[in-house]
Amino acid sequence: MRRVWLIGGTAESAVLAKAIAHSQIHCVVSVTTEAARLLYPNVATLQVWVGHLNFTNFDEFLYQQQITAVLDASHPYAVEISQGAIAVCQKLQIPYLRYERPVLEEGEGRGNIYLDSFNTLICGNYLENQRVLLTVGYRQLHLFQPWQGKAALFARLLPSGTALEAAFKAGFTPDRIICLRPPISIDLEKALWRQWNISLVVTKSSGKAGGEDVKQKVAAELGVSLVVINRPEITYPQQTSDLAVALEFCCKHVLCT
């Protein structure tokens, strides 16, 4: 049985999975948590695989799952998984397509501060004496630990034990942590920023799928500075933001091979 590997865990991967299932294309979608399993339809042609992959076991995974094409819809900042998938696909000569969520137009981000990396943010004076809300996930929180005494730092995380543990290790106290699962409405976003009297928000360039557009609107309304960390630069063999193109790719390399 030929199958496409959909690298998932994102909102757009859930949309892709539904379209793939509707087209009767056999697919295995990989996610890292049991909670993410609920994003995907429960149909016979779609298998959800839960776990952590690294480059050393990509070959075995592709062989066991009988993968003939890879559709990468992982998070734009999941650099290691994308680079590993590209490398193993080139090695095994398996077709690879990156499905990239659109970046917000420049006009929608007018007045924001765009930085090339977290290191640039940490090494600058952007955070000094600010009340900062971090909406960047848990993996980067340790970078902000040196700033705990020089700024009032708050973190918004997904509700998971792993995320909370990382926040505590980075010096965040329970009164400066909130766990919410997106999407976050404008009203809720606004209420949270006001509750904590936030003066600066740090986010990733995650597009509308990641709520970046909502943060821009709230920042403009409340006069809060918004620091956007640009996406890492990755050279993809081929990429698209078009659902129809992604489906055609799956059909060509799974149904039609």
Image (cartoon, helix red, strand yellow):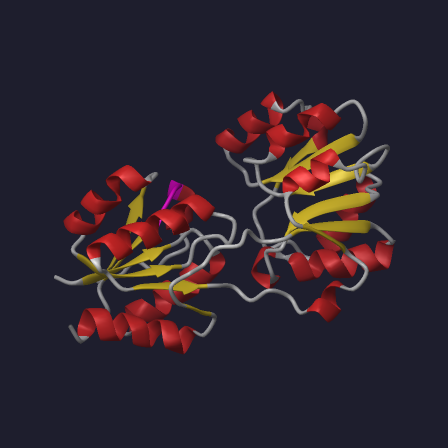
Measured from the top left, where is residue 177 in percent x and y?
Answer: 67, 32
Q: Is residue 174 above or below residue 135?
A: above
Query: Does residue 43 sit above or below 9 in this rendering?
Result: below
What residue sits 20% from the left and 69% below the top?
A: 254
**Of residues 79 and 47, which is closer to you in this image?**
79
- 75 on left or right of 56: right
| Position of residue 186 measured from the top left corner of the image (x, y, whole percent) | 72, 58
Report the front residue among 235 and 170: 235
Could you tell me which quadrant the C terminus lies in?
bottom left
Horizontal placement of 105 versus 232: left or right?
Answer: right
The magenta stretch is 30-34
Residue at point 43%, 53% (across, down): 74
**Looking at the picture, how far across and down is residue 49, in whole percent?**
29, 47
Q: Inspect this view and state whether residue 149 appears.
A: yes
What residue is rendered at 80% in x and 30% in y?
151
- Residue 237 against residue 172 in the figure, above or below: below
Number of callouts in the render?
A: 0
Let me know if residue 31 is in the magenta part. yes
Q: Seen from this angle, which residue lies furthest left?
A: 1
User: Do we see residue 24 in this rendering?
Assistant: no
